[in-house]
Amino acid sequence: MINILFVIFVGLAWGITVGAGYVAFLTVFGIIPRLTQLTKTFSKIYAYEWAAVLGAVSGTLAFLREPSFSLPSFLLIIMGIAGGIYIGMIAAALTEVLDVFPLLAKRIGIDDKLLVLMMALVFGKIFGSLFHWVYFIP
């Protein structure tokens, strides 16, 4: 009984720690407000916030329950695209907030080629993802 309570306590403590880190990531860097500013959808900020909360909760439940779905391929493609867009938008908002790309371009001396750097990163991500899905996932 003591072992079970200890595991529950440790799991709860780590869950609170990870949750606090996630909330700190979103609030300290202002990810969601910056995302709404970039997409010009500030009126939908509450939808973004609820999407982040519900996504975290449903992701946690899916991780714990390990559900199995028999969905049609076209629906899986739509879900994959939606997940990719979400991750891409969060990553774009984070790099925008931290000014990663302008600093990188300035450090390596290609200030005037910032668009080329961005396109190289975008196409590298696209081709890398396609390679992964075509080669490693039969």
Image: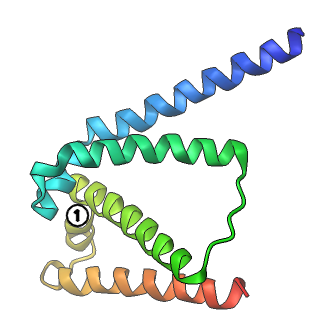
Q: Is residue 130 above or below residue 33?
A: below
Which quarter of the image is occupied by the C terminus? bottom right
Read off the residue under disc 1. 103
Give whichever of 50, 11 is nearer the camera: 50
Q: Is residue 73 left or right of residue 32?
A: right
Residue drawn at x 19%, y 67% as measured from the top left: 102
Which quarter of the image is occupied by the N terminus? top right
Residue drawn at x 87%, y 8% as measured from the top left: 2
Give whichever of 53, 96 is nearer the camera: 53
Q: In which image quadrant can residue 85 be found? A: bottom left
- In the rendered view, how is the structure colored? rainbow
Residue 34 in the image: state x and y as whole percent: 18, 51
Residue drawn at x 63%, y 22% as measured from the top left: 12
| Other residues around mark 1 within 10 Å, as few (<14) / some (14–19) / many (≥20) | few
Q: Is residue 2 above or below residue 79?
A: above
Residue 75 in the image: state x and y as whole percent: 52, 76
Q: Amino acid at mark 1?
A: Leu
Residue drawn at x 36%, y 33% as measured from the top left: 24
Helix, strand or loop status at disc 1: helix
Q: In which image quadrant can residue 64 be found? A: top right
Q: Is residue 114 above or below residue 63?
A: below
Q: Is residue 80 above or below residue 48?
A: below
